Image: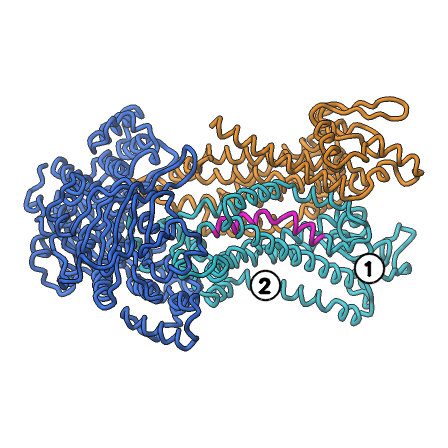
Chain colours: A orange, B blue, C cyan
Amino acid sequence: MTGYLLRRLAGALAVVLVLTAVVYATFYIAPGDPARLACGPRCNPEQIAQVRAQLSLDDPVHTQYWHFLQGLVTGHDYSTGAGVLHCDAPCFGLSYQNNQQVTDMLVERLPATASLAVGAMAVWLLLGTGTGLLSALRRGGITERVLTWLTLAGTATPVFISGLGLLMLFCAYLAWLPFPTYVPLTDDPEQWAWNMLLPWAALGLLESAKYARLTRSSLLETLAEDHIRTFRAYGATERSLVGRHALRGAVAPVIALSAADFGSMFGNAVLTEMMFGLPGIGQLLVHATTTLDLPVVVAVVTVTGTAVVLANIVADVLHAAADRRVVLR
Amino acid sequence: MTPQPLVAVDGLSVAFPAGPGPEAGSHPTAGLVRAVDDLSFTLRPGAALGIVGESGSGKSTAAYALLGLHRGTGAHVTGSVRVAGHDVQAADDAALRRLRGGTAAMVFQDPLSSLDPYRAVGDQIAEVHRLHHRGASRRAARARAAEVLDRVGIPDAARRARLRPHEFSGGMRQRALIAMALACAPRLLVADEPTTALDVTVQDQILGLLRELREENGMGLILVTHDLGVAADSVDELLVMKDGRAVEHGPVRDVLGAPREPYSRELLAAVPRITERRQRPAGADADGEVLLEATALRREFGRGKQTVTAVEGTSLTVRAGETVGIVGESGSGKTTLGRMLVRLLEPTGGELYYRGRSIGGLKERELRAFRSELQMVFQDPVSSLNPRRSIGESIADPLRAAGKLGEAQIVGRVRELLERVGLDPAAYHRYPHEFSGGQRQRVGIARALAPEPKLIVCDEPVSALDVTTQAQVVRLLGELQRDLGIALVFIAHDLAVVRQVSDRLVVMRGGRIVEEGPADDVYERPRHAYTQALLAAVPTLERPATTAGHGPAA
Amino acid sequence: MTDPITTQEPETGAAPVSGARQVWRRLRARRSALAAGAVLGLLVLLALAAPLLAALEGQDPNTYHDALVDSARGGVPFGDLGGISAEHWLGVEPGTGRDMFVRLLYGARVSLLVALGATLVQILIGLGVGLAAALGNRFVESALGHVTDVMVAMPLLVFAIALMAVVPADFPRPVLLVIAIGLLQWGGMARLVRAQTLSLKKLDFVSAARLTGGSTWRVARRELLPSLAGPVITYAAVLLPTNIVLESSMSFLGVGVKAPTPSWGHMLSSATTWFRADPMYVLLPALMLFLTTLAFTVLGDGVRTALDPRAASRLSVGTKRRTARTSSARGAA
């Protein structure tokens, strides 16, 4: 097990290295002149040259990439005309917009994204697996038909449509909830929860439809296996067949997917943040993209990519823990 | 005489909705397939009945009906089934659950998939025990589980009870399933092909165990099997089924000794006898040209610590026109060896010569010149033909790849080949799913014949077939060899089938050859202890059922 | 060891898939799939005929009609239901007064074009990489395996958004979207093709084909590709609605199709400021997008069950069938 984890982590490190190389190449080498972007539209050639020197853009490409990696591990010092700007250890550089440390900007945006993700995850794990189990157990009935179509509709709805619908219904017409504005949990937990309610619902409902479908088919598949037949042939009740024998095998792939699906979840979180104006990492990314703030874009992509790689390892370990037949190698 | 029979089946019919498809979905009553048709039999307490038949005869379906396992599956069950006085059809769900396990317990074919992979074997047995002994504590149930595991011959049972099924060997798993039945102390044991997934030596042990337990506990036994030899060894009465109907029913000696019905006679005649010498015109032996010579052949799979050696230090010669039989149990490396001989696999060590030329290390491209001369017939008639290509196209493939013949000639040759293997030449454009298993195997043979090979390796060519079909395919191979002078390497686990075709025999175990010699010598005077054990374990029709006539020892 | 068929249904499970005709028949028997197919057929027809229908209505997608919106109220269309009239069949856009009917039709063109194009790119790359990984030597296999892992790990939407920061502004956006989505999201397809090919490779008919002396490519073309068609189509049917949603998501975020090209996602994004005053402006594109995705999803489900009827029968009858194929199917899901 330890050996497996070490091997997987080494593999993950390799993947992350490739990822950063691709990202670096895509964003710092391909677009031509980052100095012009960093400096802004009204710079004269001298200013651009100055920025160029400051960002060491005249070094060979591999040296630049090496400095980028170095910055990630040890931090980086930028010499400006006036003095030295220090960028702390996981250094993704300084924002082109305001010279703020990109890492600080990420940390600042993290609570909103985490609030959204954790709450929505709770919604979809409970609602999704619950609905899936219910529809598998009520096979052939009207409940199943209704649930099947509901989950189908859920998977077909993009998050910005469900978000718009919720906003229109609860904020505009019924006026039960205020238009969401983000209140940090540490400031006022109650307001935080009230304001997060709609984002959680929008993201959670959407994902729970997917999990409901998966749970349902996974449980039905497990119930069709031979060992279930054995216990049925020894007089076990249907309830104990599901509870004791089928559930564990059925939940294994659901667990695996919930971790492995982190990437697409993140994409939907970006949409939700934009939809509800949550000051999270997704909003930061979209803003940085439209203002061509490359260090921020690179940082977000690297961090989310790494998170996804790690989530995949967690997924495999959890899957193996839940399903003994899966061999880790 | 017991007044009440243990099992009384009267006019049982079971029908399934025909295949998954639109028709079945829209008209639930139309298109039923009758798997069991008007079946009646009784079993006295403590007696043993064998239900034998080929695939599709409805034998398993009938056995499932004894425990009411068709309930809730969409199957239509009519007629009456009484087990120990309980009407299975009329019983409510709770009564049926009491009956299942408590009165009649079932042992399934595939012991691995029939156990819950996530839970310890002992816990599973304890759970089943508690289902039928409401008062039993967890601790008592665990103790009982260890006790029955010990009874079925699992060494160190108390410790092994804590292991999960995948940590057991195949034979131990089947013992554990029998132990599970034992834990409920049922009056009837229904065993559905309990030894089909097992090696012959393990099969022998399991059948012995079933016999012992029956004598010890006075359990009734219904043994469902396709293997007449297995049944002959273990039951008092035999019920022969065909197409869902009972063909013949009587004491095992009578049915096997003097079958009344033509189908029983046919079935019996088709069973290969291990004592029967090969019928073969003399003269074709011994001094043919050496086609294939393997010396110290070796094959490993995997890398590093996980390396498994499948075949090691194996030397073998195959002469033109002769048949070399290779027998061995699962994991003996016989299939790996066969695949190396035709160079589907590259040997990791040793030398392989075809007509004096080393072909062991040749690359795929360099092998093309030899491909047509070394062919193979595969085990599984389903996966050995591409389901998306017509059988004519599959057979024509080697001819087209060679590129020597024109289109019309190719089609003509394929028709010839189809006729040669006993199929309708007009079947060129039909697809594999339109054929039965035996017919598909004939197509496979025709495909192997197409490039006019010198040698064909047959890897378990008949083991997926019913016994009557088996006999026909074996006969066909014999004829082809006589007419075309092809050398055959015949790989099988079934020693009786191999004897029917082989001139020389090779016995493999654990990747090595343990004995080799002229077939009759090896069968009649086996030198190696393993060969002796293997031969002794083969169930035969000639050995009369030892328990027949014995009353239950209850 | 051997395993004579002793399951109850005689001769089931014999042929894995039996001909395109049977698949078509099974698909046709599913009413939901038929309805979805009809909806999509209509949509494609409408999208193709967009210029024609626009001419019929007498409008074009980009002309402003300032007279039709109430500048005093910030640009809400005059009249009921977003200004539906004989000239503007589905009303006009708030603020600009552009014709909704024509813009929705042209939006369908963008959606379908981008989704189909991206799916095609994904299929091609996935097939190529998957086949090469399954048939190539150890080095090729591990290299492609790692590349695929990286691709699967990429948070797609995040990457696609980020890409827009470095692409020249004058690059045609729909093409860019096709490339971005196609190039970023082939990992799943490659894994599926690789897993399927590896399990097909173990089947005896592929060994038999090797014994004919044909080249590797000949074997792949004749034996593997036809058998891969089923799983690839099934997976493509899952990718299509995903791609539609991706395109509209990116347009919604302002990094997709550029104005004034009509796009449903873009309309929805502007609609966030109008939903109180002009709900029609939200409802129309939302409905189009929802119906399209739903239809693709339903059709995808239908295709899957038609190609693998055992899955369907397992779901409807479902007690005594053995399911051996778990890992590969789950890996692809």
Farthest-out residue, front: B356
Q: Earlier in the sequence, mark 2 or mark 1?
A: 2
Secondary structure at numbered mark 2 = helix
Q: Residue at x 79, y 27 (%)?
A: A101
Q: Residues within 10 Å of mark 1 (few under 14, many from 20)?
A: many
Q: Which residues are magenta?
A: C177-197
Q: In the picture, residue C287 is in which quadrant?
A: bottom right
Q: Chain of mark 2?
A: C
Residue C35 appears at what percent x and percent y? Answer: 58, 63
Relative to residue A117, is residue A319 drawn left or right? left
With respect to residue B314, does A319 lie above or below? above
What label does residue C92 carry, if any?
1
Q: Residue at x 60, y 56 (%)?
A: C124
Relative to residue A291, is residue C112 drawn left or right? left
Q: In the picture, residue B377 is in which quadrant?
A: bottom left
Residue B99 appears in the picture as rendered: no
Q: Nearer the viewer, mark 2 or mark 1?
A: 2
Q: Residues within 10 Å of mark 2 (few under 14, many from 20)?
A: some
**The disc labelled 1 sits on which kind of residue?**
Val
What label does residue C37 carry, if any?
2
**The disc labelled 2 sits on which kind of residue?**
Gly
Relative to residue C282, is residue B490 drawn left or right? left
Residue A294 appears at what percent x and percent y? Answer: 78, 38
Secondary structure at numbered mark 1 = loop
Residue B417 appears at what percent x and percent y? Answer: 32, 71
Label 2, label 1: how many angstroms apart (C-alpha)? 30 Å
